[in-house]
Amino acid sequence: MDPAVLTGASVAASVLAGTSAVGVWLRRSTGRLRPVRGAVDSGRTPGAAPTAGLLAGLGVAPGTPATLVQFSSAFCTPCRAARRVCAEVAATLEGVEFVEVDAESRLGVVRALHVWRTPTVLIVDAAGRVVRRATGVPDRAQVIAAVAPLLSDAEATVP
Amino acid sequence: MTGAVDRQPGRLLDPRGPRFAAALTSVVLVAVLVTGSGWLALAHAAVFALTAADPRRGPYGLVFRALVQPRLGPPSELEPAAPVRFAQLVGLAFALVAAAGYLAGAPVVGAVAAGAALAAAFLNAAFGLCLGCEAYLAIRRLLRPTPSESGP
């Protein structure tokens, strides 16, 4: 057989194998709401977080028990599904607000918050701390479970 | 701000169409790699260009609507056309580089470009992931070092 054909066929085979591995990994990691390091340790310290100013600029109202901040872009198919999940949770649970941000027009904030892909969903607490984040479409039950402790904290601090 | 990101809210596609097209694209790109044919890569660049112009009227879109869609039920949801068109433009760029590489006697360049395009098409066909769309924000971040912030 022509060696060029063999080379081409083995390039194709290795691309397909490598892409399958990446696809499985992406599918497994997408949408998982991960705790943000640092936020958990400083979770009980009073005062505003360093990210509070940035997030307020996006429309996050300080003092809201839980805000879902979604970064979207025009070329983003799963953004629609993520928006549906977030808007639904915000509509069902009192104390949860939803803010959607066009990532392209806010590249400064996108850099500061280390957003690389859309959709990225951040869960922000009353002090303006990013508590959790997910890349991809988050699961509705996971979002509810993630905001629940923030809502009970808010209730506890009301005199 | 909700809704501000949908620039073409009226243009929606059956998501199974682009996925069917990605499967056919993967087959053609495997053939490009095996045969090393620059002309085949160039022909597929034309397919990418036509599909980018209108995903529903691209060659594979027409096949999908004529042969596949009538056998399927209605789609459970629709997707916006803009990401699909962007991904086709990314594919077009890679196909043109591949065609130029093979035709100019630089088969390594051709194979790298065709391999990259195959990875993106196969990821879309097998996993429903749009690599070009995923990379879009990252590309914008890297290309614009000094951000200009528009109003809130």
Image: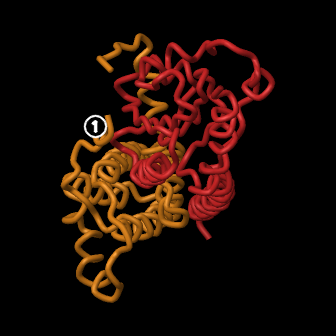
Chain colours: A red, B orange
Q: Quadrant of the C terminus of chain B?
A: top left
Up-down relation of residue B114 to residue A118 (above or below): below
In the image, residue A3 above or below residue B148 = below
- The answer to whether residue B87 of the structure is visible from this angle is yes
On the image, the x and y values in percent for residue B21 come to 36, 67
Element type at mark 1: loop
Q: Nearer the viewer, residue A130 or A152?
A: A152
Residue that numbered label 1 is attached to: B4
Q: Position of residue A155 (x, y in %)?
A: 64, 35
Image: B147 above or below B8: above
Amino acid on which disc 1 is placed: Ala
Whole-percent x and y of residue A95?
52, 38
User: Where, by quadrant of the figure, is residue A114 drawn?
Assistant: top right
Judge from the rendering whether residue B128 lies leftward or rightward of residue A75; answer left or right: right
Q: Is residue B70 left or right of residue A115?
A: left
* Chain letter belonging to callout 1: B
Residue at 47 percent of width and 50 percent of height: A82
Q: In screen coordinates, is A34 left or right of A101?
A: right
Q: Out of A113 and B63, give the one closest to the viewer.
A: A113
Point 52% across, 29% down: residue:
A64
Closer to the camera in the image, A45 or A23 = A45
Q: Residue furthest bottom?
A: B71
Quarter of the view holding residue A104: top left
Q: Quadrant of the N terminus of chain B?
A: top left
- Residue at 55% across, 17% down: A52
